[in-house]
Amino acid sequence: MSEDPSPAEGTNPDPRSGDDSGAEELTHTTDEGEVQMVDVGDKPDSERRAVAAGEIRLRPSTVEAIRDDEIGKGDVLATARIGAVQAVKHTWETIPMCHQIPITNVDTAFELGEDRVECEVAVETTGKTGCEMEALEGVTTGLNVVWDMVKAVEKDDDGQYPDTGIENVRVLAKEKRTG
C-alpha cells in the first residue's frame, strides 16, 4: 500500500489549526442556507487522480479461507474488485452533491494481512472536479463486498460480528495536473 504523501496542491488546511484561509465560504450552500451543487462550468479541464485506502478486520481463519479460495460464495477479492469499480462509476448517484465525471482509469489493490484485508483504489479522470469521493466509494464498497462474501464465516454463535470491522478509510493522495 502507498505511504501517505505530504499534502497535495489545493488541499485545505487542517480546520483544527485555526487557519481558515481555505474556507472563506461554504460552497455547497446558498446565501439562504439551501444545499446546492457547486457550479464547475467555468473551470478548465485538468488531469486528476485520487488514491484512497481502508481495511476490514477479520478473524485470521477467515483471511486464511480467502487466501485458500475456500469461501463458499466464490472468489472474494475478484468480486470485491468488481464492486469497487462499479462503485467508482456510480458515485454521483449515491453522494448527493457529486458531479458525474468521466472516469478514465480505476486501479484496485487488495492485500491480505494476518487478520485483515487492505484495499487501495486509485481513480483517474480528466475534468473540472476531483475524484477523491470516487476513490473513497470504491474502497468502502470493495470492503463491504468482502464483508458480504465472508459474513457466514465471520458470524459468532449469536449471529453477531464481534471480530469484523471496516476501519481506517482515508484519502492517501489527491493530484491535479493542468495542461
Image: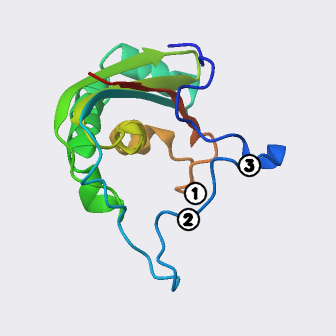
Which residue carries the number 1 mark? 158
Q: Secondary structure at mark 2?
A: loop
Q: What's the distance in space between the residues labelled 1 and 2, CA to CA?
A: 46 Å
Vertical arrangement, residue 53 with respect to residue 157, above or below = above
Which residue is rendered at x = 68% and y = 40% of the image?
13
Drawn side of residue 9 relative to residue 119, left or right: right
Q: Residues within 10 Å of mark 2 (few under 14, many from 20)?
A: few
Q: How is the image coloured?
A: rainbow
Q: What's the distance in space between the residues labelled 1 and 3, CA to CA?
A: 42 Å
Q: Secondary structure at mark 1?
A: loop
Q: Secondary structure at mark 3?
A: helix
Which residue is rendered at x = 59% and y = 17% of the image?
5
In the image shown, does 138 or 82 lie closer to the viewer?
138
Drawn side of residue 139 relative to residue 58, left or right: left
Vertical arrangement, residue 59 with respect to residue 43, above or below = above
- Residue 72 shows in this picture: no
Quadrant in which the C terminus is drawn: top left
- Closer to the observer: label 1 or label 2? 2
Query: What residue type is disc 3 on?
Result: Pro
Q: Position of residue 81 (x, y in %)?
A: 26, 29
Q: Position of residue 51 (x, y in %)?
A: 43, 26
Q: What's the distance in space between the residues labelled 3 and 2, CA to CA?
A: 13 Å
Q: Which mark is residue 3?
A: none
Vertical arrangement, residue 25 with respect to residue 51, above or below = below
Instruction: Pick out the residue farthest to the bottom.
Output: 32
Which residue carries the number 2 mark? 26
Q: Position of residue 141 (x, y in %)?
A: 36, 43
Which residue is rendered at x = 21% and y = 52% of the image?
100
